[in-house]
Amino acid sequence: TECMVLRARRAFKMHPISLTFIPKWNWLAVFTMGNSSGHNNTLSIPPGKGPHRVGCTDLMVGHTVHGTFLRLYYPCQASENPQLPDWVPCREYFNGLADFMKMNRALSERIFNYLFGSCKIPAAWNASFKPDGKYPVIIFSHGLGAFRTLYSAICVELASQGFIVAAVEHRDESASATFYFREHAEPGTKKHPSCGIAKPVSDNLEEVWMYYRPLKPSEIEFPLRNKQVKQRADECIRALDILFDINSGKSVENVLQCDFDFLLAFQNSMDLCRIAIMGHSFGGATVIECLCKDVKLKCGVALDTWMFPLDEEIFPGVKQPIFFINSEKFQWIGNIIRMKKLDSAIFPRKMITIKGTVHQSFPDFTFLTGNWIGRLMKLKGEIDPHIALDLSNKATLAFLQRHLNMDRDFNQWNALIDGKDVNLIPGTNITIPQSSI
């Protein structure tokens, strides 16, 4: 069972993966019994609750594997019949999820397409940007086995509240799938992604897909994960540097065909004195690595962080405020102890735990499966996922207002930062032995 797998992983100082391990018989049950997400509008990613409509677009700068790829969410102008992008951009991402979960690609593609093929992100594709002063910026880092679109509920909500959110797609072989381009001299033989939104501007570019890299037999995990978290941090910082260029009026070439004018929209529209970094699981570790590397990041929000990839030697260098928002069912003693090693008498550290949540209460999967299947697959906890993510988002907004010195009304949720709610636990639900403290 999954619990046995998680205990074994913890015993060997390994990790419960970001996209939950799912036994094959569970998937066969899903395939046999079905799920209503493709046919029932009640199973959908929730729209933002803030005062702004939300738009989104993709930006790839540099066509090689060393370039930068991200999904941008931003406040946009209202429009009639906006185009909503697919939640999973194309079939190659389904293949990546299948490989990550050790499933047959042909079977899994049918399953995933049935379950999630019609799911849309509640953000208008390439919508006109809404000028309204300068918006603070959030860089978002996805978890192990995920990719740039799987946390759209969080990103859309933050954009609706007046943030520009850059969700980075990592190329450290921790994403279930991603792609880049290489130059191809022979015309007429190149391939492009199966989704229309990812075509390159140049005719001599051919797509190259990069899938999740599993551990090799007898491979020691820490060197790989530590190398990956450092690359992830560098990718987040490069994304931020690109936003600085755009904000200052420097032209940035998008490798992807796109009707969106980044310079026209975003020049002098970002408040780059107010920047936060946010991420889930492996992305939470990326938050801490980024804070150590770049002081332009003023604070970090780490969702159910997997601390294993981090070198503890960097901890004294993290001087920005950190907010740990944990699920009730994922954390364990060793992981919490490592979080506690970041405690400081000088620099703010906060931690809360959301009751009834599981590790997958943060990605979008939790909204796109019915209760029975969601719990069977560990994609849902005991709490209503809308309540859980609403608490997480409101606590995040209150924390951001406090530490980005914003003049908003998010301080109405300040009590959540301290875990003051019937569905919250201040700190952690994990009992730490006194000897460990």
Image (cartoon, helix red, strand yellow):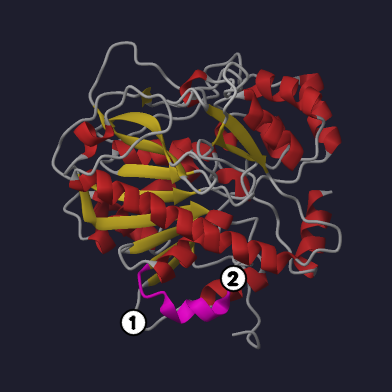
Q: Do the residues labelled 1 and 2 touch (CB within 8 Å)?
A: no
Left or right placement of residue 349 versus residue 4 in this view: left
Residue 189 visible (yes or no): yes
Left or right placement of residue 267 versus residue 427 in this view: left
Tell which of 293 and 388 is nearer to you: 293
SS label for mark 2: helix
Say few, some or many: other residues with alpha carbon within 10 Å of mark 2 (under 14 / 14 to 19 / 20 or more). Answer: many
> Which quadrant of the structure image shows residue 308?
bottom right
Tell which of 78 and 139 is nearer to you: 139
371 vs 115: above or below = below
| Amino acid at circle 2 | Ile
349 vs 357: above or below = below
Q: Does the magenta stretch include residue 132?
A: no
Q: Is residue 317 magenta?
A: yes
Tell which of 89 and 185 is nearer to you: 185
Q: How many labels does the image show?
A: 2
Residue drawn where x is 63% and y is 50% of the image? 174
Which residue is outermost to the bottom?
435
- Which span of residues is magenta-colored? 311-321
- Spatial separation of the CA atoms under disc 1 and disc 2: 20 Å
| Amino acid at circle 1 | Ile
Residue drawn where x is 37% and y is 66% of the image? 294
Task: Indicate the position of residue 52 as horizontal and vertical percent values.
Answer: 25, 32
Please give the residue where the numbered disc 2 appears in the rendered image: 336
Task: Indicate the position of residue 249 as horizontal and vertical percent values.
Answer: 19, 43
Residue drawn where x is 41% and y is 81% of the image? 344
| Label annotation for residue 346 | 1
Tell which of 344 and 437 is nearer to you: 344
SS label for mark 1: loop
